[in-house]
Amino acid sequence: MRQAENMASPRIAMGGFLHETNTFAPSPATLDDFLEGGGMAPLTRGEALFSALAGGNVGLCGFMDAAREQGWTLLPTLWTAASPSAHVTEEAFEHIVVRLLIDLEHAMPLAGVYLDLHGAMVTTHLDDGEGEILRRVRALVGPQMPIVASLDLHGNVTPLMVNEADMLIAYRTYPHIDMAETGRRCAAAMAVLLGQKGRPKKAFRQLDFLMPIAWQCTDELPCRALYADIERLDKPPLLSASFLTGFPAADIPDCGPSVLVYGEDQARVDRIADALVADINAQEAAFAGRVLTPEEGVREAMRLAGESSAPIVIADTQDNPGAGGNSDTMGMLRALIACGAGGAAIGNIFDPQAARAAHKAGVGAMIDLSLGGRSGVEGDAPFRASFVVEALSDGRFVAAGPYYGGARLDMGPSACLRIDDVRVVVVSRKAQMADQAMYRSVGVEPRTQHILVNKSSVHFRADFAPIARAILVCAAPGPMAVDPATLPWQRLRPGIRTSPLGVPFTP
C-alpha cells in the first residue's frame, strides 16, 4: 500500500537501525546479519516498510499507526536490525547509515524525523553508534528540525545522543511488550514539537552502578515500582520521562543506567531527574537475585516439578542470544542429562550443521552428533552423544506471544532431537526462546513438559510466566555474565560500580 501524500500535512521521515552490542560476545554483526534480519525483518527500504513491519511489536509500527491518525505524510527511509552480538562491523554500519542519509535527503523537505534506534550499539570503529547516526542526521537536516528517537530500555545513553536528538523516549517494559507503544509515544512527542518553536529542555543523568540484566524485569521488584513512578510522572507539563536500566556488557565509558526528562521548564526537569535518580539509588541492593549453578537449578526444578503439573522454567541467562550469546553452549543440557531429568525440553540450540544432519537422516533416525559448543566460551565444549530425530520443521511459524507480537519468524531448518527423556530444539538461525511457538514448531508442547530450559534472560517471561509453576535463573557458561562484575572491564568510566553495592571501577 502506498502512503498517500497530502502536501498540506507535515512531511515526516522515519527509519530505524537497531543493534544491542555485547563487546564481550564471540561473534560480530556483519552486513549479512542486517540483510537477513535474524529474528527480525530483513533490511527493508522505502514503501516496502509499510507492509513489512505492519502490525508488529516494533517502535516504527506504533509510530506509523499514530502518524496516520495525525494525518501526516510519511516518508519511509530504511529499517534494519540484527540479533545482539559483538561489535557491528564498520562495513555494516557505514553501508546502512549512508543509505539512510541518502533516503533522508531524497525525502526532503521535511517537518520532522523519527528514528527507531536501540541505544547500545558499539561498532568496530565507534563507541557510540547511535550518537554518530544522530550526529549525521542532524548535520543533514539542520539545527531546527525536530528529531525524535525511540530507544530500548537497555540503551547506554551518551551525551552526544542527548545533544543531537530533540527527544529520546525509551521502552518501559522488560520483556519489551511496549515497543510499538513507545513508537506511539514518540509520535505524540513529535506532534508537540511540530507545534512549538525551540527545542525542549532536557535533563540527563547517568547512574553510578551497573544493573544485572536478569534482575531488570519490569514485572518484578524493584523495577515494577520504579517504572510505576515513571508512568505517574510522565504527564503534562512534562513532555517525557524515561529510565533506562542500560546494557551491562558494553566496555565503553557511557555503559550503564540513565534517566532522561524533557519539558518546558529547565528547573522542573532537573528536579524530577534528580528525584528519580535518588529513588533508583535507594533500590540498588534489590538489583541482585538468586543465581543457581546448572545442576543446582535442574535438581531444584525436578523437586518443584514433583509438586506441580505446571512446568518449571529455567533461564539459561548467560547464553542469551538476545544479549550477545550464540545460543549454543551446552552447560544446561549436560546438567539435564547428568541429573536424570525427565519430561524436559531445552531451546533454542543454534547449530545449523546439526539441523542439516537431522533433516538428512529423517524422523525416527538415530544420529551421532557433536552438538553446539562452538563459540569458544570458557568452560564449554560440544556435547557428543546419540540423538533420536523426533520431528523436523522448515522453521517458519508465527510467534503469537506478547514479545514477538505475532511476527512471522524464520529459524531455518529446525529439528527436535531427543536424548533420554530430554528434547532439544535445534535451529539454523539465532533468536532467543521467548515464545511458546518455538517449541511447538518442532512438535514440543511446552505446557506438558516438567522442565523448560530457555536460552533467554527475561523476554521469555512474557509468554512463559503464565504457564510456569516457578522460574529459576541458572549461570551456565556463556558470554552474557549474570554478574557484570565478573567481566574483564577496561574502559568503563572511573567510579562506576560494576555490580549493585560493588567495588568502584578503577581503570
Image (tube, rainbow, N blue to C red):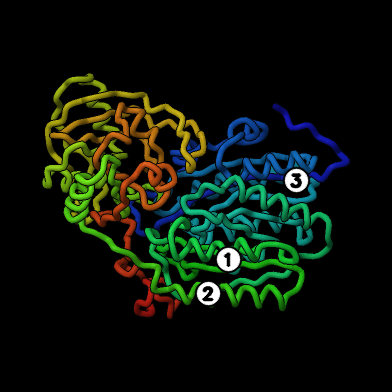
Numbered badge on residue 229: 1
The residue beneath circle 2 is 279
> Which residue is situated farthest in the right direction here?
8
Q: Are marks 1 and 2 in contact (CB under 8 Å)?
A: yes
Q: For the point 37% across and 34% down, which residue is it?
A: 438
Find disc 3 in the rendering and name its residue.
12
- Where residue 444 appears, as percent x and y from the top left, is 29, 30
Among numbered discs 1 and 3, the one appearing first in the sequence: 3
Which sits in the foreground, 83 or 191? 191
Q: Position of residue 259 (x, y in %)?
A: 57, 68
Q: Amino acid at mark 2?
A: Asp
Q: Amino acid at mark 1?
A: Asp
Label 3's element?
strand
Q: How many marks?
A: 3
Residue 467 image offset from top left, x and y in percent: 36, 41
Residue 441 quadrant? top left
Residue drawn at (22%, 45%) of the image: 305
Give how far apart the Cα atoms at labels 2 and 3 are: 37 Å
Please tell me how crowded label 1 is: few (under 14), some (14-19), or many (20+) other residues with Cα within 10 Å.
Answer: some
Q: Quadrant of the N terminus?
A: top right
Q: Find numbered disc 1 in the image and state the secondary structure of the residue it sits on.
A: helix
For marks 1 and 3, give the CA distance. Answer: 32 Å
Instruction: Measuring from the top left, give residue 289's x and y in whole percent.
Output: 33, 64
